[in-house]
Image: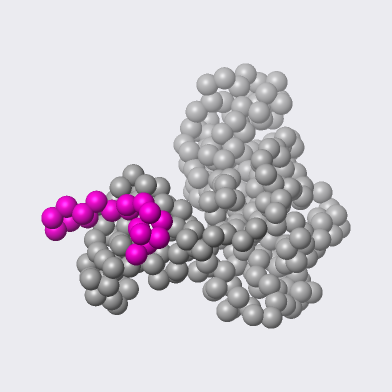
Amino acid sequence: MQTPRRFLPSISLLSAFEAAARTGSFTAAAYELSLTQSAVSRQIKALEDQLNVPLFLRERQTVRLTPAGEAYSRDIRDALRRISTASLNIRANPFGGTLNLAILPTFGTRWLAPRLPDFLASNPGITMNLATRLVEFDFRLDTMDAAIHFGVPNWPGTHHLELMAEEVVPVASPDFAARHPANGDPAALRQLPLLHITSRPAAWEQWFAAHDVASDGVTGMLFDQFATIAQAAMVGLGVALLPSFLIAKEIERGELVPLFDRPMRSAEAYHLVWPKERDPFPPLKAFRDWLAAVTKASEPIT
């Protein structure tokens, strides 16, 4: 069913409203849009008349949003951003498709990026845009087509493809390990400074429990990215519990050493996640088919 025209204001009216709502000033919006203040005022009045809802309260020389205007501005700002992104994507790749993918920073740089040339060579009509995300997010509030998430699948309104599990191992700098020998005793780590990653808050507790060590009251420094926690371990700040496939180069170069040859398989896994409505999107379908083939052909991540 076609949407009534009165519910589809023109982009010029919406742009004037969004700028005025964001800046809190008709004058500032006019400067941003290269219009006169009176032109912006007329456009916003026309929008209010079309919607039959007041969006601004006009008080002497100032304006402020009404409650309805506040709510409308959030939705319109998101809609304009989506339109802008779609326009940019089609301009960048008018003959193919653009896939907007959110990635976990270290997984993206260490595992995905080295393999992407193969995907792009096999799909020359597809352009990829990558954006890092440290935590899971709501696809309704973001313009991403898909994302790499780590966890147990519980993402409403989405489909997912499991990519791989991971094994974590406690590591430290060679100097730190020499000064704090554990002598094969997992419990000895309880006496050492432990480094934690915020995306895996219970990792150390799980590791100690898996090795029959009391896991209550585990404390230590917090880090929000694997790159920084790995660097902290390399300079001797403590012991980090890290996925072995993400630190293979540091171990090979001798910058980090495992304190035990006892890796623990995580209960969570890496997944490609996408909104259900994006299922038929050709670039996404090509990417997940390629990922499925790559992960199936790869050896287990250890």
Residue 25 appears left or right of 175 = left
59 up-or-down from 269: above or below: below
Residue at 61% of width from left, 22% of height from top?
215
Residue 239 appears left or right of 1 = left
Query: Residue 289 occupies which quadrant of the picture?
Result: bottom right
Residue at 56% of width from left, 26% of height from top?
190
What range is drawn magenta here?
46-63
Where is residue 181? Give x, y as percent: 60, 33
In the image, residue 122 lies in the stretch drawn in magenta: no
Query: Residue 28 occupies which quadrant of the picture?
Result: bottom left
Residue at 50% of width from left, 28% of height from top?
219
Where is residue 173? Give x, y as percent: 56, 46
17 up-or-down from 104: above or below: below
Q: Is residue 107 visible?
A: no
What is the quadrant of the N terminus in the image?
bottom right
Q: Is residue 277 visible?
A: yes
Q: Nearer the viewer, residue 264 or 87?
A: 87
Where is residue 83? Give x, y as percent: 52, 67
Where is residue 196? Give x, y as percent: 53, 37
Residue at 82% of width from left, 56% of height from top?
292
Q: Nearer the viewer, residue 30 or 232?
A: 30
